[in-house]
């Protein structure tokens, strides 16, 4: 029976090191979805540097990927492990990666560590990762130029601390296939710990030998190959997968990459990468430069989050992700999204909570000869509470009656009404913004009766405030 050669895509990791490329948030999600459909075993992401923005990126990609493992590298600190895991933990198959220099040059000049300190950092970081997941990868950077004794010690330390995959890298890209095979065989003999884990390889492509070296490694017993669908200085995923598919039987190997769909999918990825950033929006200003908040379908998650902040919202990472997902759906087929529409999106997607209060019934009387008067009955758990209040119009009276029933009084920051459908039975949509302790909370309601929509929107916002106050 042929053994499975796992292919780990490093496109996003490789593009990170290339100044000519800068994929937007949305492009990275689309790239991950394409790779997932292609059947790669692992999708490797960039590390987390800007905690809020990068954590949102990792969480969004992790939720979008259905079958592949999602891998995120960590720095050699416990804090980095915590940050990466909090962003990655909801992935179907999360993997934490610990990369460390094993050559004297990189150890001294990039990591500024002596050998003993590097070994201890490897042990501690891999152990911290293993506390979170069994799927921990140790990456020996520049392994082909390392001191053999130190490389074997580093592998042993990582495996002992809990690494389940060990990756050996040829960072110089100057090795030939036969030499790389000999290096792997010698390393297996010198580091017995490798016998109990998966062995992965990553080859640079300085001499255009990365594909050949990767295939040679597979023939020499490597379990995983790192390649890129859009190769920038690395092995080519399309070439490696095609060789294994057509000639893998000669060395007892196969891969799950869907080679039938590979050509079309790789072309889509190539187009995505070649056109990167060309449509990335900047948001905030309309074409006339009036300062009105305007977003477009091309804006990424950071732009949407910044626009929401400009409107006064203080959104959590989870809410930012939910708002951006709703924004993407809403923006399809639209030329622009203005502040009013973004308010609706935030009200719909952000901070959805279990309702403390729900509407049981209401009655509003109004006319040109009398003041408006409203009565509301609300459910609060198993209890029914009531409120009665006059107001300057039916909606104002309804809001005051809700305040009397709940005992909750907050500043009304904004109130919007719009028709969702056309005709006499048109649906009306109301968005309410309430201010509490310096934060804004949006609620949304829809009904053929605008007063009913307003009451639901008002209660929706109150429920969010009450829930957050109870959790504080």
Image (tube, helix red, strand yellow):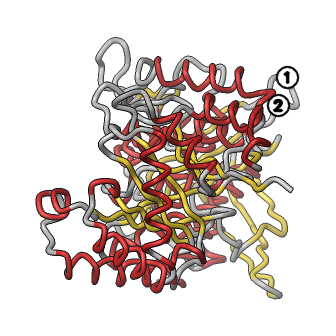
Location of residue 416 by image quarter: top right
| Residue in the foreground of this view, choosing between 50 and 425 | 50
Residue 257 image position (x, y, % from top left): 73, 40
Identify the residue at horizontal 19%, vertical 57% (top origin). Answer: 106
Q: Which residue is mark 1?
A: 423
The dot on residue 174 is: none
Q: Going by the image, does 407 lie left or right of 245?
A: left
Q: CA distance from mark 2 to mark 1?
A: 5 Å
C-beta proximity under 8 Å, tags 2 and 1: yes
Q: Is residue 254 above or below residue 246?
A: below
Identify the residue at horizontal 32%, vertical 66% (top origin). Answer: 75
Q: Which residue is mark 2?
A: 426
Disc 1 is placed on an element classified as loop
Identify the residue at horizontal 71%, vertical 74% (top origin). Answer: 357
Location of residue 325 by image quarter: top right
Disc 2 is placed on an element classified as loop
Mark 2, other Cα within 10 Å: few <14 / some 14–19 / many ≥20? some
Mark 1, other Cα within 10 Å: few <14 / some 14–19 / many ≥20? few
| Residue in the foreground of this view, choosing between 80 and 258 | 258
Residue 227 image position (x, y, % from top left): 53, 40
Q: Is residue 98 visible?
A: yes
């Amino acid at each position: 029976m042929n053994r499975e050669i796992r292919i780990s895509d490093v496109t996003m990791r490789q593009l990170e090191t290339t100044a000519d490329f800068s994929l937007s948030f949305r492009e990275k999600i689309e790239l991950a979805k394409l790779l997932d459909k292609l059947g790669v075993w692992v999708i490797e992401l960039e590390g987390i540097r800007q905690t809020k923005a990068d954590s949102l990126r990792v969480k969004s990609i992790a939720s979008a990927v259905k079958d592949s493992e999602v891998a995120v590298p960590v720095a050699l600190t416990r804090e980095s492990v915590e940050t990466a895991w909090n962003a990655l933990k909801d992935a179907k198959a999360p993997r934490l990666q610990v990369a460390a220099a094993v050559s004297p040059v990189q150890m001294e000049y990039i990591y500024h560590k002596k050998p003993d300190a590097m070994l201890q950092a490897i042990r501690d970081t891999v152990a911290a990762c293993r506390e979170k997941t069994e799927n921990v990868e140790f990456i020996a950077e520049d392994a082909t130029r390392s001191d053999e004794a130190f490389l074997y010690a580093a592998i042993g330390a990582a495996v002992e601390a809990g690494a389940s995959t060990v990756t050996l890298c040829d960072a110089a890209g100057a090795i030939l296939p036969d030499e790389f095979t000999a290096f792997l065989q010698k390393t297996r003999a010198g580091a017995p710990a490798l016998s109990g884990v998966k062995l992965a390889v990553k080859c640079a492509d300085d001499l255009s030998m990365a594909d050949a070296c990767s295939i040679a490694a597979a023939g020499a017993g490597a379990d995983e190959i790192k390649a890129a669908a859009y190769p920038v200085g690395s092995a080519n995923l399309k070439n490696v997968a095609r060789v294994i598919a057509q000639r893998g039987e000669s060395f007892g190997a196969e891969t799950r990459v869907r080679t039938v769909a590979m050509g079309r999918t790789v072309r889509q990825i190539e187009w995505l990468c070649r056109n990167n950033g060309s449509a990335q929006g900047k948001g905030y200003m309309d074409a006339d430069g009036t300062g009105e908040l305007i977003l477009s379908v091309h804006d990424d998650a950071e732009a949407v989050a910044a626009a929401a902040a400009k409107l006064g919202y203080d959104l959590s990472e989870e809410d930012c992700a939910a708002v951006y997902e709703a924004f993407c759906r809403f923006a399809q087929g639209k030329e622009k999204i203005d502040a009013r529409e973004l308010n609706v999106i935030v009200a719909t997607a952000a901070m959805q909570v279990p309702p403390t209060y729900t509407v049981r019934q209401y009655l509003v009387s109004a006319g040109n000869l009398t003041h408006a008067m409203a009565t509301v009955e609300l459910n609060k758990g198993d209890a029914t509470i009531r409120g009665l209040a006059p107001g300057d119009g039916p909606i104002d009276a309804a809001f005051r009656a809700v305040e009397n029933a709940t005992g909750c009084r907050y500043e009304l920051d904004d109130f919007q009404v719009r028709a969702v459908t056309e005709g006499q039975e048109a649906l009306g949509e109301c968005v309410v913004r309430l201010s509490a302790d310096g934060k804004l909370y949006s609620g949304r309601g829809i009904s053929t009766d605008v007063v009913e929509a307003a009451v639901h929107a008002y209660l929706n916002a109150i429920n969010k405030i009450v829930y957050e106050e109870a959790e504080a």
